Image (cartoon, helix red, strand yellow):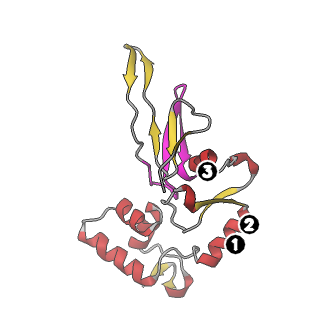
Amino acid sequence: MNEEWKAVPGYEGLYDVSSMGLVRSLDRFVNSNKGSRRHRGRILTPNFNHKYARVSLCKDGIVTYKNIHNLVAMAFLDYDPASGLVVDHLDSCKSNNCVSNLEIVSQRENIRRSSIKGEMSKLTDEQVKEVKKLYKTGKYTLVDLAKRYCVSRITIWRYINNWFYRNSITTHGKIR
């Protein structure tokens, strides 16, 4: 699949989003107290501190945080966030924001799919053991492990700190 870039709706001339789930700022001139200066465009680094990958966008001095999958869907799938519909990740990996992995569905359908895919429990028992083992080596951060297992950083933190909530193997909310 060839990567295609389109303007981020509402941020035309400032930011583009790609069909592969990347977001970039565009070259532009920025006025500051020292006068006008050229701001070179670059690929934005997503923030994975929440459930989904997101970026901060600035327009008229106001910074807003946007989920990348919503930006991709708005640009390539004509998604309107005010419609009441949501964007579903077909492969359940919240960091895979390629347009081919996204579909606009109702909230009810999204929940139905999540339960069918087993997304209510994030990792298997074996994966939890592996996460703990990898984290103890000191070679992996919470963010590294979250990306590797397609879950949020806080989910990895909960597993490592025994704040685990699956009923099948828990005792008083903690994994054995």
**Residue 139 within the magenta-colored segment of the rendering:** no
Q: Residue at 51% of width from left, 46% of height from top? A: 4
Q: Does 7 sit above or below residue 160? A: above
Please give the label number shown on residue 73.
Answer: 3
Q: Which residues are magenta?
A: 46-69
Q: Nearer the viewer, residue 23 or 58?
A: 23
Taking the image as shown, residue 70 lies to the left or right of residue 25, namely: right
Image location of residue 164, percent across then percent down: 48, 75
C-alpha distance separating marks 2 and 1: 6 Å
Whole-percent x, y for residue 82 in the image: 73, 46
- Left or right of residue 164, residue 73 in this image: right
Helix, strand or loop status at disc 2? helix
* 157 or 63, nearer to the observer: 63
Q: Residues within 10 Å of mark 1 (few under 14, many from 20)?
A: few
Residue type at tag 3: Ala
Please report contact status of discs 2 and 1: CB closer than 8 Å, yes or no: yes
Q: Nearer the viewer, mark 2 or mark 3?
A: 3
Identify which residue, 163 or 23, lies in the foreground: 23
Q: Earlier in the sequence, mark 1 or mark 3?
A: 3
Question: Please, what is the three-letter code of the amino acid marked with disc 2?
Answer: Arg
Amino acid type for the residue under numbered disc 1: Arg
Name the residue tied to disc 2.
108
Q: Which residue is mark 1?
A: 112
Q: Are marks 2 and 3 in contact (CB under 8 Å)?
A: no
In the image, residue 49 lies in the stretch drawn in magenta: yes
Would you identify the image quadrant in which residue 11 lies?
A: top right
